[in-house]
Image: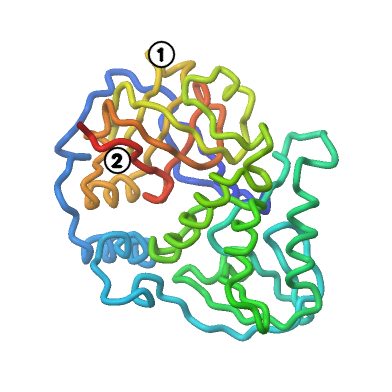
Amino acid sequence: MMVLLRCDAARTCIAAEPLPVHRPNVACDTERMGATSIPTDSLVRRYGAAGLALASFFVPMASAMADCPLEPAEGGRVAAVIDGATLRLDDGLVIRLAGIAAPEPPLSAAVSPWPLAEAARAALAKLALGQDIALELPLAGRDRYGRAIAVVTAEGADGSLNEALIAEGLARVMPGDEPSGCLSSLFATEREARENRLGLWSDPYYAIRAARDPALADRADVYDLVEGRVLSVGVRGRVAYLDFGRDWRTDFTAVVAGPAGEALAALGQAPASLRGRHVRLRGWIEDHDGPSLRVTNPAQLELLDDGD
């Protein structure tokens, strides 16, 4: 077994659940990872708060507020901007902007300055430094390091800082533990910035990668968007492997962890049903028998075709 590290945009890494290093005799297990709907109450019982967050992806909501349950929290004045997605208040509280990834170098990078990293930090400083801000916390309001994971609004601003950075093309959507309703407007704003080639969307380093691109092997520890057609699907236990090439030992693979696979199944997008589908994935590239990407949130996977 090998333990993967899950890293956020602030380059803080925590141990994720172990995954099998080898996949001998992996077969497509449609009973385990099939299209059967998963009752939301069972997700909550099994996974607690994480299950509740996943349940929000497929429980019909009565209003936009219900789609994105946020808890108001005490704000304060911004004393420092650490990077393009991290603030520190005058009382010492460190805040990560929920649902976004600003340009940051991978841990192994020796290049300085990093493309657009300073531009993102400067843009956030212009919007927030010295300003009083209001905080709204999704279900997972704090991470294990005590940082507030929040939707942040500066006093007098029309919208959140989270969305403002994406609108300028200085951040991309990065699904974490937020309910899907908290991400829908961010995805729409990202799409507009991408179509207009704003900010990072005009920089080749941040281009959407083809799943068959050999250069993915050199992008370990990079947050990327990857598109391609799923060639085959294998399931081992509660983990599904979406293979985009004929040799999973060298070609790109998306690894769908258990809760995310169950949530996708409840959306009618069971991993076992994705063979032949054209998809876009987003997440951290890992070097694991070829380049791979771990899917822990259903919003990391977008279908780009109609399935016909």
From the viewer's side, name the closer residue of 181 and 126.
126
> Which x, y percent locates residue 191?
50, 49
Image point (34%, 40%), residue name = 303
**Image quarter of the C terminus:** top left
**Image quarter of the N terminus:** top left
Q: Are marks 2 and 1 in contact (CB under 8 Å)?
A: no
From the viewer's side, name the closer residue of 75 and 182.
182
Asked if 105 appears above or below 266 in the picture, the reply is above
Asked if 139 appears above or below 76 in the picture, the reply is above
Element at badge 1?
A: loop
Residue type, label 2: Arg
Residue type, label 1: Asp
Numbered label attached to residue 247: 1
Decide: few, some or many residues near mark 1? Use Cα within 10 Å; few <14, some 14-19, many ≥20. few
Most extreme residue toward the front, as rendered? 196
Numbered label attached to residue 238: 2
Image point (30%, 23%), residue name = 232
Most extreme residue toward the right, as rendered? 112
| Earlier sequence position, callout 2 versus callout 1 | 2
> Which x, y percent locates residue 291?
52, 26
Tell whether 34 sits left or right of 156: left
> Which x, y percent locates residue 173?
53, 53
Numbered label attached to residue 101: none
Most extreme residue toward the top, as rendered? 246
From the viewer's side, name the closer residue of 234 and 279.
279
Decide: few, some or many residues near mark 2? Use Cα within 10 Å; few <14, some 14-19, many ≥20. some
Image point (41%, 18%), residue name = 248
Tell whether 238 sits left or right of 65: left
Q: CA distance from mark 2 to mark 1?
A: 21 Å
